[in-house]
Image: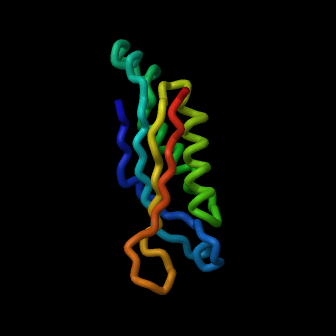
Amino acid sequence: MTIELRNIEVYARHGCYAEEQKVGGRFIVDADLVVDASLPAESDNVADALNYVEACRLIADVMATPHHLLESLVAELTRRLEERFRPRGLTGGWVKVRKVAPPIGIQVESVALKAEIAPRG
């Protein structure tokens, strides 16, 4: 099964320029979390599941810590999701962070980085 998290919007201070770190901007996070859901499907108990509320909160927590580069931010998100949710059945997926209207002097809707969550194995 895949848990799809879409359009988690946060205001954060990521960027390598002082103005980005001072003023901040909008970021949108999407993720697909591939899970072995056989246990929670049988037990019907949230304690056995990869809880999407916990996943969204973890993403928001990571997004609150400024990073200079999207590369390091996305790597941190991936690492933390794997660390927290492998024991709850996470077997793979991906995370994408979009920086909305980056201040680069050119009209751009967003810039995004996407990283795979390594398959368990």
Which residue is found at the position 40% from the left and 77% from the top?
108
Quadrant in which the N terminus is drawn: top left
Quarter-of-image position of residue 34:
top left
Q: Is residue 84 above or below residue 106?
A: above
Q: Quadrant of residue 65?
A: bottom right
**What percent of the width, then of the height, locates residue 86?**
54, 29
Residue 84 in percent (x, y) is at 57, 33
Residue 93, image quadrant: top left
Q: Residue at x 38, y 17 (%)?
A: 38
| Image coloring type | rainbow
Vertical position of residue 108 compared to residue 116: above or below: below
Could you say which is closer to the camera, residue 11 or residue 28?
Answer: 28
Q: Position of residue 39 (x, y in %)?
A: 41, 16
Q: Residue at x 44, y 32 (%)?
A: 51
Residue drawn at the location 51% of the way across and 81% of the way down: 104
Describe residue 53's horizontal placement relative to residue 73 as left or right: left
The C terminus lies in quadrant: top right
Seen as rendered, the residue at the extreme bottom is 105
Outermost residue to the top:
42
Q: Position of residue 91 (x, y in %)?
A: 48, 30
